[in-house]
Amino acid sequence: MPQELLDHARTTLRLRHYSPRTEASYLHWIRRFIAFHDQRHPSHLATHDVESFLSSLAIDHHVSAATQNQALSALLFLYRSVLNLELDLPTHLVRAHRSKPLPTVLTRQEVQEVLRCLTSTHQLMARMLYGSGLRLMECLRLRVKDLDFAQRQIIVRQGKGGRDRISMLPDALAPDLLDHLHHVQRTHQRDIRSGQGFVLLPDALDRKLASASRDWIWQFAFPSASLSADPRTGHVGRHHLGPTGLQRAVQQAAALAGLSKRVTCHTFRHSFATHLLENGYDIRTVQELLGHRDVKTTMIYTHVLNRGGLGVRSPLDTV
């Protein structure tokens, strides 16, 4: 019965166009919920069973508030959208309170030091994260047609919240990015000659545009080094790079640079926003480039600007 339920949940997720990452995450939490209650069917469980599972995550496994909220979202989806049942959860369990730490921001010099410790495609992608303010997956999912060299802009498709936006394509990045695309195009041409060259298309475009999956403009700008089968359709093609490689490379580069900060791929995005504000750009402009729905989210970078030597002068320095 649990497997039938998981298949039903998977079908419902795809009918509602949830991303593959969200699908995998929700199915993971549904499996853990069922295993926690000794493989009992969720329709036979009550609200207090959901509460006990979420409490166990927090108390026994010490998960973060974000992880607990993700598990809750998966269970709410299971009951409301798959089982058509409503949960009457206590108010304090609706969402766990998340702290709002200030983001880690690198100085311009630190950015350059980390970039110098990166090589090849990893360095190019990191430069794009910093130079255009992209999220990691937004960078990895870029297709050739999303890079407008004439207008010096990048079109981000289906960003966070499913929204499209336009960001800048730095002049300093353009030559190296064009050279990279020439290498990618040669690989694509070899794939075509060997009878491959397919890429996964969004939505139903593979049926509407029969040949588009082999067209150059639809290929990923940062493709994988090997062909792979799409887990949903089974079609073999060249997908984009996975996130793990760049994440590890950035961490190693920060260590080689001798930085005492925790540096991730997202740190480049934080630094992009902060440095734009330092340069005097309007916060609404930065909000638009970042793709924030609410300017309050962008306002956190104004708090970063007020730290240390960039803001209030310490009384110790005036003695």
Image: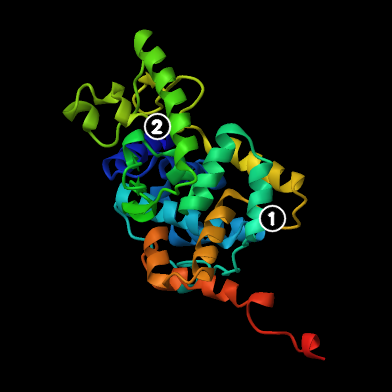
Q: Position of residue 189 (x, y in %)?
A: 37, 16
Residue beneath disc 2: 220
> Outermost residue, right direction?
319
Q: Is residue 119 left or right of residue 285?
A: right
Residue 17 placement, left or right of 121:
left
* Residue situated furthest left in the rendering: 208
Q: Is residue 91 above or below residue 178?
A: below
Q: Position of residue 13 (x, y in %)?
A: 33, 43
Residue 295: name its quadrant: bottom left
Q: Secondary structure at mark 2?
A: loop
At label 2, the amino acid type is: Phe
Numbered tag placed on residue 262 in the rendering: 1
Q: Where does residue 264 sit, x and y in percent of width and height?
A: 62, 50
Residue 180, labelled with which disc? Answer: none
Q: Is residue 38 visible?
A: no
Amino acid type of disc 1? Answer: Arg
**Which residue occupies 62% across, 56% down?**
63
Residue at 39%, 32% in the rendered image: 220
Occupied quadrant, residue 205 = top left
Q: Looking at the image, what colour scheme do you see?
A: rainbow
- Compare residues 188 and 280 and report the one nearer the observer: 280
Query: Where is the C terminus found, in terms of image quarters?
Result: bottom right
Question: Closest to the observer: 216 or 298?
Answer: 216
For label 1, the crowd category at 10 Å Cα-Cα, with few meaning under 14, some 14 to 19 and many 20 or more, is: few
Say above or below: 200 vs 111.
Answer: above
Q: Residue drawn 43% across and 56% down? A: 73
Q: Position of residue 147 (x, y in %)?
A: 36, 40
Identify which residue is drawn at 62% across, 62% down: 105
